[in-house]
Amino acid sequence: MKRVMSIFTLFSLLAVLCFLPGCGYKLGLTGMDKPYKNIYCYTVVNETRKPGLEMPMTNAIIDAFHHYGGSIKIVTNKEEADAFMLVKLTSFVRSPARFDDADFLEESSVSLYAELFLYPYDLDPRESDIQQNALVKPIYHVNFAESATYFLEPNQPEGERSILPQLYDKISREIVSLVVERW
């Protein structure tokens, strides 16, 4: 009899939980987690020592959202935006990936570290402006990194430069994934 009562209580609780979303109640956070449809993407801020990453990375992010084709899209007009995305490239790290039998470096790895911020309103993405206004709170903030490896060529800078588009693609797909999974 006690077991039947506990099963009945469990089913009753499940039934109530199933009908809550239909009544307008939500489990979890509300308000800050509203689904955003239109995002304005600021030009990527490059804080690394590697110059020239800003525009190729910004274009890769915009292209990744266009290829995503879902309900979230990048807009060019700030007045149409529900949220504002700021991406900072914080570190560019080279490291050895593989050595041959004679202990010569054959393959190198490049890691690009980034921060993603989503804000509910327009702001000037310059670091000094964000620091001056302590009330600027992002609705979403995450640190992440992506890596790519390349074989060393006689011209090492050319090998590294050839891997950058792959790295841009990886980071931009990760950004789309982080934003889409957020909502």
Image (cartoon, rainbow, N blue to C red):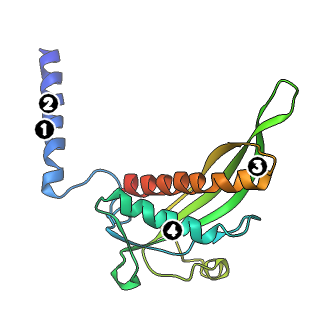
- Disc 4 marks which residue? 59
Real-space CA distance between mark 3 and mark 4, rounded to the nearest whole angstrom: 23 Å
- Disc 3 marks which residue? 94
In the picture shown, does residue 24 fall above or below 111? below
Sequence-wise, the earlier of marks 4 and 1 is: 1
> Circle 3 sits in a helix, a strand or a loop, which is it?
strand
Quadrant assignment, res 89:
bottom right
> Circle 2 sits in a helix, a strand or a loop, which is it?
helix
What label sits on residue 15 in the rendered view? 1
The mark closer to the camera, 4 or 1, is: 4
Q: What residue lies at 44% left-to-right and 64% top-to-bottom?
A: 63
Depth check, front residue: 129 or 65: 65
In the picture shown, does residue 74 fall above or below 115? below
In the picture shown, does residue 90 fall above or below 17? below
Mark 3 in CB contact with mark 4 (< 8 angstroms): no
Sequence-wise, the earlier of marks 4 and 2 is: 2
> Circle 1 sits in a helix, a strand or a loop, which is it?
helix
Three-letter amino acid code at the position of disc 1? Ala
- Disc 2 marks which residue? 11
What x and y, as percent, mark residue 73? 35, 67
What x and y, as percent, mark residue 54? 62, 70
Sequence-wise, the earlier of marks 3 and 2 is: 2
Mark 1 in CB contact with mark 2 (< 8 angstroms): yes
Three-letter amino acid code at the position of disc 4? Asn
Residue count near mark 4 (Cα–Cα under 10 Å), binned few <14, some 14–19, many ≥20:
some
Sequence-wise, the earlier of marks 3 and 4 is: 4
Real-space CA distance between mark 1 and mark 3, rounded to the nearest whole angstrom: 55 Å
| Viewer can see residue 147 | yes
Three-letter amino acid code at the position of disc 2? Phe
